[in-house]
Image: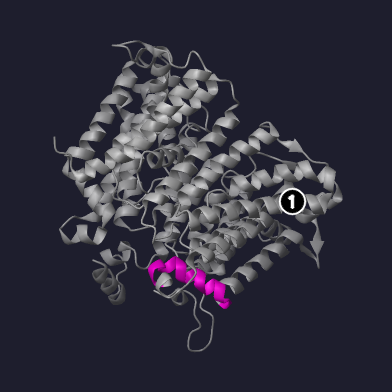
Amino acid sequence: MHISPANKAELRALMVPGAGLVGLGVIFGYLAPNFLTTGNLLNIVTQMSILVLVAIGQSFVLSTRNFDLTLGVVVALASAVCAIAVNSWGSTAYLVAPFVGIVCGMLTGCLVGMLGIQPVVATLGVLIGLRGVAFLVTGSGQVVPLADRGFATWAAYSNVFGLPPATWFVCGLCVLALWIAKRSVLGKKFVMTGERREAAQLVGIRCEHVVWKSYILAGFFAGCAGLVLLLRAGTGLPSEGVGMEMQAIAAAVIGGTLLSGGYLRIFGTIFGVAFLQTLLTGLNLIGTSPFVAQIATGAVILAAGVLEGAVKNTSEVGA
Amino acid sequence: MTEHREIRRSKQGRLRLLPAGYVALVLLVVFSLWVPRFAAVGNLENIAKNASVLAIAACGQLLILVLGGLEFSIGASAALASVVIVLTVPELGVPAGFAVGALVVIGIAFINGVWVAYFNLTSLIATLGMMIFLTGLTSAIAGGLPMEAVPTKEFLWLARGEVLGLPAPVLLAILSLLLVHVLLKHSTFGRLMHLVGSNRTAAIAAGTPVRRVMLWGFTIAGGFTALAALILTSKVASGQPNLVPNLAYETIAACAIGGMQLNGGKGHACHVLFGVAIIAMINNAAVLLNLPSPVQQLMLGTIIIGSVLAQTKNSNLWGVGFFSTKKVSHAHQSSQ
C-alpha cells in the first residue's frame, strides 16, 4: 500500500499523542483500578465531545494560519440562544445552534478574511462584543433552563448502540471534518492558503474567501458544540466556555498542528483532545485537586510547544 | 512601511497626532459636553487612576507586540504575584514582600523569553501554557480562595499614595510611558527590537543577536507587568487567584485601539496612551450613564473593530474602494 509523504508525516506526528495516550492508560490503570473499565473509557469519550468539536473548528482556522479566540463564547451564545428558541418554537429549533455559530463565523471571518484585520484584534473584538450579546439575550447572563427536557435527556444520557445519541452526532461530525480535510477541495485550499499564501493566490485561489470559509466552518463546529452542551446540561449556559478556545488551540498543537499554518490534522486534534481529557479524568480518579490538573495541562501544552519548536526549522526563531 | 510614517514631524516641525489621538480628543470633548459629572476634576482624576494599571501593563504588552509576539500569561502572573506578596509581607515586611512579588513576575517573563527565544516556541503557545500552569499553581497555593492582607498604610501606599500632588499610580504610568518611548525610539536595543519584530531574516543577516534581543525584550516587558501587579495588589489589599483574568486581552485591545498594527515591528508609546485613554473614558462614561455592563462590552467590542478598521490603511477595506486613494490602491496591487 502506498502512503503519500504528507500522510507519512501526519502518521509520525500522531505517534506522540498516541504514545502519550497509551502511557497515560498504563499509569492511571495502575494507580486507579477503575480507570481501565469500559464504563470509564466511554465516559471519557462522552466528556470530550464538546471540546473535540471546538478543537476541530479551531484546526480549520489554524490551517489557514489564523486563529479564532471567539469559539468559546460562540459555544455559550449558541447554547443560550438555542435554549430560548427551543422554549418558544419546540424541538425543531435545536437546529438554531449551528446556525448561530455560522453567523458568528461569518462575521469574524469577514473581518479577518475580507477586511484583512489581524486575527488577534478581530477575534478579540468579536469575543468581547459577543460576550455582551450573550448576556443581553439572556438578561444579565442568567441560565436558560429548557422547559421540556425530554429530548435533551434522551439525546445526552440514553444508550443507543453503546453511546448516547449526542456522542454519535459528534462522531458523525468528526467524520465530516475528516472528509473535508482529506477529500474535499476546500480542505486542500485551506492547507495551500496557510502554507504559502502568495503561491495559492498565483494559482487562482481566492485566499480571502478561503479564510472566510475556514472561520464559518469553525463557527459551525462551535455552534454544534453549543448544541451538545445544551443537550448535556439541559440549560443554556451564556457564561460557559471561557478559555475553551485556548484549550482547543492547545489540543491542536498537542496533535501535531503547527501554528505557522498549512497543517490540517483532524486525527491529531482528536488525539490531542483525547490526551487532555484522559489526563484530566485520570487525575480526577486518583483524587488530586483540580488545580493540579490545571498545572499538568499547562505543562503538557509547554511540552507540546517544545516539540513543535524542535520540529520547526531551527534557523527560524519563534514568536 | 516604517513606523515613523504614523507619527512624524511635518515640514513645519509640528507633531502630527495619530488618528486614535483625534478619537480620544473627540471622545473627551463629547463626553465632557453631554455626560453629566464627566468633566469634574475628581472624575478625571478617577479615570486616570483606574487607567494607570492598564497603561503600565499595556507598556509591557507593547514591547512583546513590537517583537512580533503575544503575551497571554500576564494576568495569571499578576495573580500569582498578589498571592506571593500577601504570603511574604507578614514575614519580610512590605518593601521586601513586594520585591519578591516583582521578582516572581520578572522571573516568569524571563522563562517565557527562554521558551520563545531558545526553544523556538510560538509565543502564543508558550504564554498560553504558562497561563494555565500559573492559574493552577496560584489556586493550589491559595487554596482557590482570596487571601486577605493586613491593610497597613505602607501596603496601600502604592495604590493610594500621592507624590507631588499626583496619585502614585498615575505618576508611575506616566514614567512607564516615557520609559517605553525612550526605550523603543531612542535606544539601540529598542531599534533592534523593531528590527527583530519586522523582519527576522533581515535581522539575522545583519548579525543581530536575535535570541538575546527576544529574551531581554520579554524580561523588560515583565518589569512593566510586575509594576502593574504590585499596584493591583496594593489596590485590592488581598491575594486573589482570579485577580485580573482578562488583563492580557485588555492590554492587546488597548494597543489595537491605539492604532497599532500587531504584526510586529511597529509600535509607539502613544498607541498605549491613546488606546488606554479611549477604553478608560468609555468605561467611565458608561458607568456615569448607568449603561448595563453587557451594553458596555458590546460597545467596547465594536470600538475595537471599528477603530482598527478605520486605521488600517493597508487593509482591503481601503483597497476595495470605500476610501481608496491612489497610493493605497497601488499598495494593494503590489501585495497580490
| Residue displayed at 38% across by 40% down | A252
Residue B37 horizontal/vertical position (percent) = 68, 56
Residue furthest to the bottom: B12
Q: Which residues are magenta?
A: B186-202
Instruction: Tell me the crowding category of disc 1: few under 14, some 14 to 19, or many 20 or more residues within 10 angstroms, Cα based.
Output: some
Please state which amino acid type lies under the numbered disc 1: Val
Location of residue B241 with respect to B335 vertically, above or below: above
Q: Quadrant of the N terminus of chain B?
A: bottom left
Query: In the rendered view, does A200 fall on the left or right side of A225?
Result: left
**Mark 1 highlights which residue?**
B100
Magenta run includes residue B301: no
Location of residue B42 with respect to B131 vertically, above or below: below
Splitting the image into 4 quarters, where does residue A152 fall?
top left
| Residue displayed at 34% across by 30% down | A224
Q: Secondary structure at mark 1?
A: helix
Query: In the rendered view, does B127 fall on the left or right side of A220?
Result: right
Residue A63 horizontal/vertical position (percent) = 30, 47
| Along the viewing direction, whichever of B42 and B160 lies nearer the viewer | B160
Q: Quadrant of the C terminus of chain B?
A: bottom left
| Residue displayed at 28% across by 45% down | A214
